[in-house]
Image (tube, helix red, strand yellow):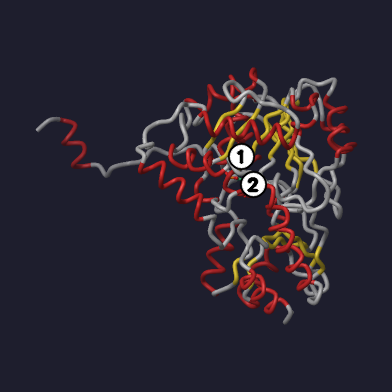
Amino acid sequence: MNARLDTAATEPARTPPIESRLPQVGTTIFTVMSALAQQHGAVNLGQGFPDFDCDPRLVAAVEKAMRDGLNQYPPMAGVPLLRERIAEKMAALYGRRYDPASEITVTAGATQAILTAILALVHPGDEVIVLDPSYDSYDPNIVMAGATPVHVPLKPGSFEPDFDRIAAALNPRTRAIVINSPHNPSGTCWSKADMERLAGLLRPTDAFVISDEVYEHMVFEGEHWSVARFPELAARSVVVSSFGKTYHVTGWKVGYAAAPAALTAEFRKVHQFNVFTVNTPMQHGLAAFMADPSHHLGLPDFYRHKRDRFRAGLVKTRLKPLACQGTYFQCVDYSAVSDLPEADFCRWLTAEVGVAAIPLSAFYADAFEQRIARFCFGKKEETLDLALERLAAL
Ligand SMILES: Cc1ncc(COP(=O)(O)O)c(C=O)c1O
């Protein structure tokens, strides 16, 4: 018997200790609340995904791609026709023509696009500004790049960008700022003046912008001010979007990043050795479906109707709906109902009232408390009506 086998027989197998790269990260509040919602049979308005299906023609287009044998690796940057469709859409809506060959990359959802952009642009020792409340992947992504997240709050109450505080946070180590409009969780949208103010602040710096625009087609008042509409910002930005949000297919995890060629070249170096490519039939299906822009052009009305229905019900409850200019999230001030901290209130609401929500404090690095909870109204009318019926009892 050889020595290695002798050792294996006498000592228990041992996993070496791991030094966590992300020691602060635990189970997310979304997972916790969804599990609690299931346990209590609550209406789940917590996590942000639709409970209705996508257009059957989109499924048929994906099925056709599969049956046509489009099942092998696509080009690394994405199926050319899909990149062309993205370029056409962005040119039509935002007036900037991104070159599909050198400036657009199809990604495994916006999540991978954001991580890839950060890994490509940010170096150890850099700082990246994040505006809180913020989507939960930004901070750990920055830490994974060896950089320091610098959390700057949006103005409490209005959730508008606080440019004085952003200006104060900018310094020579600032490599990038992550912005997100329409904004999850608050539902606010940046105005043209906000974007111009940002352009002015960044002008003397070498900071990049990672612009998370996954809710670009869910703007209910006015227009979406993409960074792509501002040449000065677009020149230093990676624009990120998500087909999951736009086409009601969050589980497909397909998105894209659009950026000037020099940035895209670096982005693709990371992308190539991360996912390399994104699944082929979904890309063909989306490209075929996008030939008709009526879906994304009709999305604001589709979600505005749900927003209005949900808000009309909320005003009859003791919850106070905050302004909602975009996204499928509606925040409420619950201070007339309870003085519990947000996470406790949301647990109570799920278990006792039967409606799951997400505490806004979960989106702040310092768990800032405002007695605000976030609901997702991207749901069927009967789901919203059932939730409202239960909330009316509060
Ligand atoms: C602001 C924001 N960014 C990014 C994402 C992730 O998008 P995807 O599912 O395409 O990765 C989400 C999903 O909820 C989001 O709300």
Numbered disc in front, either 1 or 2: 2
Q: Nearer the viewer, residue 248 or 25?
A: 248
Q: In the image, what residue type sits under mark 1?
A: Pro
Label 1 with label 2: CB-CB less than 8 Å: yes
To which residue does mark 2 refer? 136
To which residue does mark 1 refer? 140
Q: Alpha carbon of mark 1 to alpha carbon of mark 2: how far?
A: 8 Å
Q: Is residue 200 left or right of residue 119?
A: right
The spot of residue 275 in percent (x, y) is 47, 32
Picture quadrant of residue 332: bottom right
How many numbered discs, if any?
A: 2
Q: Is residue 61 left or right of residue 239?
A: left
Helix, strand or loop under label 2: loop
Picture quadrant of residue 17: top left
- Residue 132 in view in this figure: yes
The spot of residue 305 in percent (x, y) is 73, 63
Q: In the image, what residue type sits under mark 2?
A: Asp
Helix, strand or loop under label 1: helix
Q: Residue at x 68, y 32 (%)?
A: 148
